[in-house]
Amino acid sequence: MSILAAFQANKMIPEKYKQMSREDLEVRVKEVKEKYGSRLFIPGHHYQKDEVIQFADATGDSLKLAQLSAENTEAEFIIFCGVHFMAETADILTSKSQKVFLPDMRAGCSMADMADLNQTERAWDKLQSLFGDTILPLTYVNSTAAIKAFVGANGGATVTSSNAETMVKWAFGQKERILFLPDQHLGRNTAVELGVGLDEMAIWNPISDSLEYEGDFSKIKVILWKGHCSVHENFTVQNVIDTREQYPDMKIIVHPECRREVVEISDLAGSTSFIINTIEKAEPGSSWAIGTEMNLVNRLIQNHPDKHIISLNPHMCPCLTMNRIDLPHLVWSLDTIEDQNNNNIIKVSSEIAKNAKLALKRMLSHS
């Protein structure tokens, strides 16, 4: 089911939740959590608002939270505070007796939406006609269940920002070329770190259904899907230059979803977990500019008053789709458990789940 179809199939939040005070909303969350105990599990992604994350039973990245949901076999109800593709992964990995809810069905991911199944199948057919059976597809976990299933059905695997290098190495052990979906920047940054030249990378444009590359196609090793994270693409080279001018001793750490030219001139680049761990282990008094989502940066600032921390882009906004999950929607989801309304349940079809799980298992067995 597409995000649009899923959204249309569910009701909008009743007005009464919008009218409740923050205090009443917080009291209600505590009541439901106490009543259901271990039968209820609330995973919260790192990029969630503080008003939501305070009630999370676990925090982490999307895959970790999906895995924790599956491991928590006592939990009948999983209220996934993240975005649509994350809740899909949780549904894929959890048992049939568990129900996964997304508090607001509008909480999508612009990057995941940049690669749909029809586009991918068309691209695959054209790439096969150009290169034959020499390509292995890899998809970032920040993709829809349908794309994960496509990759799984075609011998490929998922990757995370933490294990991307391991999985790209594995893929090159299988085939001569890789198709990397849907984030071109993570794909490019990973391939460069492994020694692939920029002149050996092409871009697949899903809008024009064409391969963007100047030169001999036989030299292409990596085909990057023309997609990106709308948050991380907003960090620029100028941001780095301005930061270094204002704070010469400040270290710059960015997420590998940032553009290549930004990663190249930063001090460190790594996954969300890498960024968090680096800041936690940093010396008191050290200074850091962080190129990632603003809710997380603000939380790191609050949690580490002994360090000077700023956002690499002073005008950065939080992830808008992630921010759709708020206290009113969280309470609404919890109340749907009570009244058995079953609004906003995320359910991946068995066929898609089967092939998507193949892609996930290949990754987990090689990382």
Image (cartoon, rainbow, N blue to C red):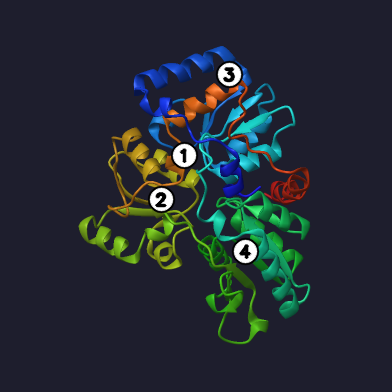
Q: Earlier in the sequence, mark 1 or mark 2?
A: 1
Q: Residues within 10 Å of mark 1 (few under 14, many from 20)?
A: many
Q: Tag on residue 180?
A: 4
User: Is 250 placed left or right of 44 in the picture?
Assistant: left
Which residue position holds label 2? 292
Q: Is 149 situated left or right of 256 in this image? A: right
| Count of all numbered marks drawn on residues in the image | 4
Q: Cα distance, mark 1 to mark 2?
A: 11 Å
- Mark 3 and mark 2 lie on one chain; the one further toward the N terminus is 2
Which marked residue is nearer to the observer: mark 3 or mark 2?
3
Residue type highlighted by circle 2: Thr
Instruction: Find residue 5 and report its horizontal and vertical position in percent.
Output: 61, 47
Marks 4 and 2 sit apart, C-alpha to C-alpha, by 21 Å
Q: Is residue 162 left or right of residue 55?
A: right
Q: Residues within 10 Å of mark 4 (few under 14, many from 20)?
A: many
Q: Which residue is mark 3?
A: 338
Q: Which residue is mark 1?
A: 46
User: Helix, strand or loop at disc 3?
Assistant: helix
**Residue 54, horizontal then vertical, whole percent:** 43, 27
Q: Position of residue 113 (x, y in %)?
A: 56, 56
Farthest-out residue, left: 246
Q: Residue furthest bottom?
A: 215
Label 1 sits on what residue type? His
- Left or right placement of residue 174 versus residue 7 in this view: right
Confirm or deny contact between disc 1 and disc 3 (CB under 8 A): no
